[in-house]
Image (cartoon, coloured by chain):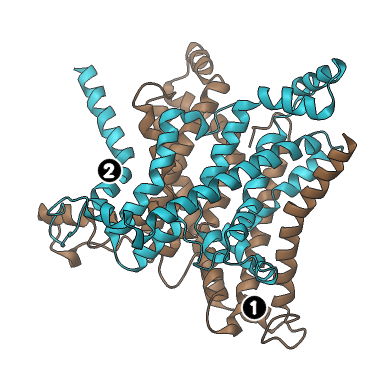
Chain colours: A brown, B cyan
Amino acid sequence: MRRTNSLSTFLFFLLIILPFSAGLIYALLYSFGLIGILNHGFTVVNWKAVLSSGETVRSFLFTLYIGIVSLVIAASLAMLYIIMGKKKQSGGASYFIYLPLTVPALVAAFFTFQFLSKSGFVSRVLNSIHHTNGIEGFPDWVNDSFGIGIIVTHVMLALPFFIILFQNYYHSEKMETLRELSATLGSSTSQFNRKILIPVLLKKTAAPLVLYFIFILGSYEIPLLLGQQDPQMVAVLVNRKLSRFDLSEIPQGYIIAILYTLVVSLLLFFIIKLKNRPHAPPV
Amino acid sequence: MHHRFSISLRTIWALTFSMPVLFLLMLSLAQQWRFPDVFPETFTLINWKNLMQNENNLLQSLGVSVIISTVVAALATSLGFWMSRAIAFHPRKNLLTSFTYLPFVFSPVIFASVLNFYFILFNLSGIIFGVMLAQLFITLPYALLLFVDYWDLKLKSLEDLAFTLGGNSSQAFLKVIVPVSKNMLLLCFFQTFLTSWFDYGLTSVIGVGKIQTLTVKVFQYIGEANPFYAAVSSCLLIIPPMILLFINKKYLFNTMK
């Protein structure tokens, strides 16, 4: 048994710790000019360039904006669904709520493009009922500066996930019993929703919600298809800089990757704290 | 009246959630879809036929995707389950669990980008094995996190009972622990299968366009401005998870406690 355990620990270091550390060390060495084709020894020029570049700041702010707005809309809609209607999944209709979970991010982005772009399905429907006048009459909902297409796609993918998550906790936290109790004590439905249901569900699901937020921040395919040239979401910007023909931009790509890692590490630290507190929800 | 209202509401709800699937199916059957037309003029199976012919290699891509996802899911699930035991009963369990989150600090495509150098160095770039290894770096920690909380005193007592009855450690693991954990193993297999099946970022960076999985094909067709072929490939990507959902939705979403 001891031999099995030490082999497990060895594999843990080999397949989990090593790839992460090797990737981070390579990125750090490259960013300080210590390795790489065009680098000639230690320098902080690249770091200075990235930290003072508007493009990096815009990219981080845009990524945070997409993450926060998508998360807030999806969680609010899911909460509304719980408050207004179904508290659990049952019957044939429940099959449909799972359907968006079968759609990969790339396909979801492709769907949004075909559905919401200027020549997309919605534009054609509005044109046919004379609400808009041709392609130009339809607003920019994809590749736009507000990231509408990106947000819509993230909400579409997150909504079923959040509904099912909230429903699970609705039952495990015995909300139905609490609802009856609060009614007996004289509270109205709206008081129950505001003071008990929403706070309890949000507190219990905080860790998975933050994990999903990280997933949105790191998304690649969706902003790649539906985003614009500037600002780009961080994963798209990093990959663009690393795969460009202009080799001088490669160190900058690694620096942005390191900065992104720092931001997400702080968020993960927060999740682990949440998870390790007593009576923590399973993540 | 109320009953009828609730049925129509349910239909609207069902239609909303199935919209992406229905829309992609429609697009896969279209050949021309000029602007003012709300729906394509004609519906035909020609796109499906064309892509199923050998020269387009879509069936080959389907095969590559199935092989990569099955191997990655099988490896991540079996290794993850086996390794999670050591972590779950490790004196520094919390620290090791925290380390397991590390690969998620990178977004998958960023992770692939910072590791690309090593993959090129060890000749793992542009080959199926390289893509599988890269995907294992993401799916294995996921499996570990899923399993580490699964090991509890009850499971440990079962294992101890097997020892008391004269079983050795591999017998206890393979003949007692694995069979009682069947549902959890299946859940992990399907979730890691889907992670691999849905992946585009890791595969495109490590596979450098040579490993043509279905997601890579979808992106290629979008790039070639051929939405109809992209829709066919998208349908092929969605169908397996839909079948899985139909068989048993609990494997698609972690509702087991």
Closest to the observer, A216 or A106: A106
Residue identified by numbered label 2: B22
Q: Chain of mark 2?
A: B
**Residue at the (55%, 19%) spot, across then down:** A174
Residue B193 vertical position relative to residue B34 in the rendered view, above or below: above
Residue A65 seen in the current view: yes
Above-or-below relation of B94 to A251: above
Do callouts 2 and 1 mark residues in contact (Cβ within 8 Å)? no
The answer to whether residue A79 is seen in the rendering is: no
Using the image, name the chain to which the residue with label 1 belongs: A
Residue A34: image location, x then y, percent: 76, 81
Quadrant location of residue B202? bottom right
What x and y, as percent, mark residue A136?
Answer: 19, 67
Comparing labels 2 and 1, the label whose residue is closer to the camera: 2
Q: Which percent across, then down, holds residue A269?
A: 71, 49
Q: What residue occupies the far right of the structure in this picture?
A: A2
Toward the viewer: B40 or A100? B40
Q: Is residue A29 left or right of residue B212?
A: right
**Residue in the foreground of this view, choosing between B96 and A75:** B96
Relative height, residue A191 to residue A237 (above, below): above
The C terminus of chain B lies in which quarter of the figure? top right
Q: Viewer-proximal residue, B243 or A59?
A: B243
- At label 1, counting other C-alpha atoms closer than 10 Å, the crowd grade (few under 14, some 14-19, many 20 or more) is many
* Callout 2: SS: helix
For label 1, the residue is A251
